[in-house]
Image: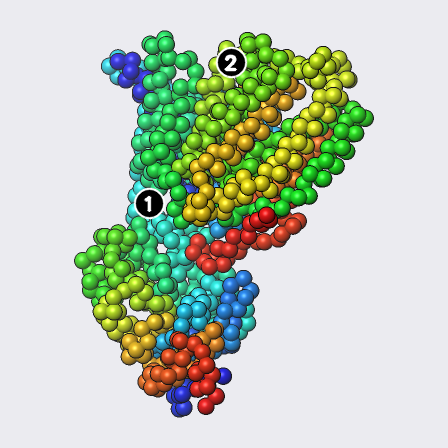
Amino acid sequence: MTASVASGSGQRQRPTSEAVLVVDNLSTGYSGVPVVRGLSLTVNAGEVVALLGPNGAGKSTTLLAVSGVLPALTGSVEVLGNPVDRRAPHRNARRGLAHVPEDRSLFADLTVAENLEVGLSGRRSATRRALNVALDHFPELGSLTSRRAGLLSGGEQQMLAVARAVATEPRLLLIDEMSLGLAPIVVERLLPIVRNIADDLGAGVLLVEQHVDMALGIADHALLLDHGELTLSGAASEVAARRDLIEAGYLGGVSSTEHRAT
Amino acid sequence: MTHLTFLIVGLGGGAVIAALGLGVVVAHRASRVVNFAHAAMGMYIAFVYYELRSTGDLVQPLLGLPGRFHLIDRPTEVTAFVIAMVVAALCGAFIHAVIFRPLRNAAPLARVVASLGLFVYLIAIVGLRFGSQSASSRVLEGPLPNELVTWGDIRVPADRYWLAVIVVAAAFVLWLGYRYTHLGLATRAVAGNERGAILVGISPNAVGLANWMVATMLAGAAIILAAPVVRLDPSTTSLLVVPAVAAALPGRFNSVWGTVVIGLAIGMVQSEILNLQGEWTWLPRIGLQQGVPLLVIVATLALRGDVLPDRSSTLGSTLPQAGDTRNVPPIAGLVFVMAAIAALFVNAEWRSALIVSAIATIFALSVVVVTGYVGQISLATFAVAGVAAFAMVRASDDLGLAFPLAPLLGIAVAVVVGYLTALPAVRVRGLNLAIATLAGAVAIEELVFKWAWFTGGFAGATAESPSLFGWDLGPEAIGAAFPRRTFVVLTLLLAALCVVGVANLRRSSTGRRWLAVRANERAAAAAGIAVVRVKLTAFAAASALAGLAGVLSAYSASIVSASSFGVFDSLVTVAIAYLAGIASPIGALVAGGLAEGGLLTALVDTVNDDASQYQFAVNGVLLIVAAVKFPQGIVGTGTRARRPSGFGAGAATDQTSPPVNHRP
């Protein structure tokens, strides 16, 4: 069913030694009902993979299963070479997985600085270094460190959510709908930062995004999910070239089957 | 100057309230629960300390294991205190691991019931371990110096100052800890957004564990140090949780300094009221002091409450399913016929048990209506029942009303009082309503039940035996003929009628409106239901049931005393009704059977004479187990097994409420 546009560098083919995330034949969902079925994907270090698809395709569900919050019905998830810990999901974060969920999950009553520190070990030197890394990517937050997170604007909150993840110096970063509720101009500023994070930290990034063109502009690879199944995968430039397939995926209907048949 | 003296004396009581309030705040931050058992935990730890001091025995709280073992001979104050703190930390860890950690994502009502179960259990276990010693409030030698300190004209025992200083120091340490330590930061993060905390690598369980250990140690230290000031007695001390909750409430269970300031203020005002009662002879002699926390609670809730709830404050969506009640009348009829036939043959002990169970069924029905059907919670059931009982006695003694009129008047008074205690329900819901009604119950107990003219004072009031057209309906008789069979059958009949009545109400349009309000107040309002009126109707119906139960228990005991209508009984009734199945009239029947002194007690007594003393403790355990494992209750679990599961407050898994069965 999967239309693979990629030929040589298809990223599903070879989980290399630098793979930070390997998802194999994953089915997951809520209360035993699968939302995502038979999904396989790989994210390598330093690589941005965009996960695209219409509402209800299972993008957020996939991320929740990768970070150990949702159970896998079948298949496996390996993060940094280890199976993801679903009994104590907080351990995954300590091992270098950072997840920026759709609702941002900020601590509204804590200050910006406290939000950034809370996930760190508490050692002073490590804390300072991590804060610097986070503020390097988001200099706007530098003047807001003592403000309560609940008082930030939507864009600032989103920066803080990503900065909090970056502060933990993750090796795998999951970002869910970073652009939700933000003006396109803000998104245009935020997405390149994600690219920088992947390049600077050498982290693998799995990015769920509704702004398809902007996401494809910064991603190395892209996957298209529809009704919980992978319908297209390949290098970002090649996926971008198949606009018809993407539009069919978002708008639904007959044309997608037609194209898959070709 | 006397004013200042009394205010300073009040620092002692205020410090205890503030310290307990701090513990309530810590537990709330850790588990989002208002722990009604907080003072009871401190009470148990204090018993451990004073027993260590006097005998060197360590008393452990787990039922089924040996109650005490000898640790050291005559430990010093410091040794005993350290051991008591270790015991407190272990208890806190155990309570978190076994009760509140599994309930992390459960319905608020399940957490309330679990904390009530813990409350019942701790009081019962202290009663078991210390026997009659526990009831007498011994004069205790506390660890703090208590010689009089003279300061100008003011002569106050030194421990009052010490207590105030210690609680402020404790608050300062807590405040520093929450602000500057990593654990404190993690605690605030978990309290703010649990899913976010997990995603940045914080374990909510580890955070909860540490906080519960701190909370229990705080509770223990508070009661140990203050026992000479506040007396140490299982139930009185445990009810100190009411002013403690009042102190924590204005700061939304989150403010360390707010809790301390308000706690100290409550204690000082209470002490000053004692002074004013001496000066101004027109003030009522009793009860005013207990009114202070109630005033704080009502004022806070009145200023804070909203007519419609915000997104997170309902407890309705996770209540057990309120199923169809078509099969209730035949079942109730069958149970009545069997019980009535049995009443003709069984001995006096079993007849008493039948009466107790029938009355408890009516009490439980009152809870089914308010909590099971409308999703509100009231902890004032027995206070309302007591008002009915005493009003009935006054009506027949002072107004000379005959049998059916006096109890009817009593029930009418109960409806009015129940209506008044329900007024907070217009604006507050969930836990806050539980707190408001609990404070209301304590206020009724202190203001009304200690009013000698109304209640006959210490001796109690005598309820005239009911008779109709010369036919004696009362229980009075000589020897083994007591209680008379006529009264047993009458009580059973009334209970059965109430069960059928509630079942029919559930199927009427009133019942459908109740369930609509329970499911979603905002949606109900949007559908044109007058939410406030529906709630108040339900409270009125529940008060009538409670009033009937109160009148019947007055007749069955013939001497009515305030002690039979305590706050504790209200807590136990809500808890047992929940355990039996809170959204079903059949659940109320089961609750009647389980009640203390009812059929289960009689059965246990027949099997083993010594066993019934454990019933309270076992009830506590059962409640906790029920709240953790069977949120549907005994009756609900059979019909529908649904185990809430899933992760975090915001997970998508647990948002499906059980569908309410609307049959036309």
At 60% across and 34% down in the image, what residue appears? B364
Question: Which residue in the structure is indicated by mark 2?
Answer: B454
Hey, what amino acid is under mark 2? Phe
CA–CA distance in space, label 1 to label 2: 51 Å
Q: Is residue B486 placed above or below B217 in the rendered structure? A: above
Q: Quadrant of the N terminus of chain B?
A: top left
Along the polypeptide, which appears first: circle 1 or circle 2? 1
Q: Quick one: B248 or B663, which is closer to the camera? A: B663
Q: Secondary structure at mark 1?
A: helix
Q: Give amino acid for label 1.
A: Gly
Residue furthest left in the image: A143
Residue extending furthest right?
B345
Number of the front mark, 1 or 2: 2
How crowded pointer 1 is (Cα within 10 Å; few <14, some 14-19, many 20+) is rated as some
Looking at the image, which is closer to me, B76 or A224?
A224
Q: Which residue is mark 1?
A: B177
* Frontmost residue, B395 versus A89: B395
Residue B565 visible: no
Using the image as rendered, state which of residue A14 and residue B470 is in the foreground.
B470
Lateral position of residue A122 relative to residue B422, left or right: left
- Residue B203 is left or right of residue A37, and the answer is left
Task: Give coordinates of residue B137: x percent, y percent.
Answer: 51, 20
Q: Residue shown at 70%/36% (left/top)?
A: B332
Chain that bears disc 2: B
Q: Is residue A183 visible?
A: yes
The residue drawn where x is 43% and y is 60% is A90
- Which residue does the image show at 59% across and 53% down from the upper left? B642
Helix or strand or loop: what does disc 2 sit on?
helix
Tell me, for residue A212, which label it has, or none. Answer: none
Give the chain of mark 1: B
Query: Residue A201, how many percent across, how many down?
Result: 30, 73
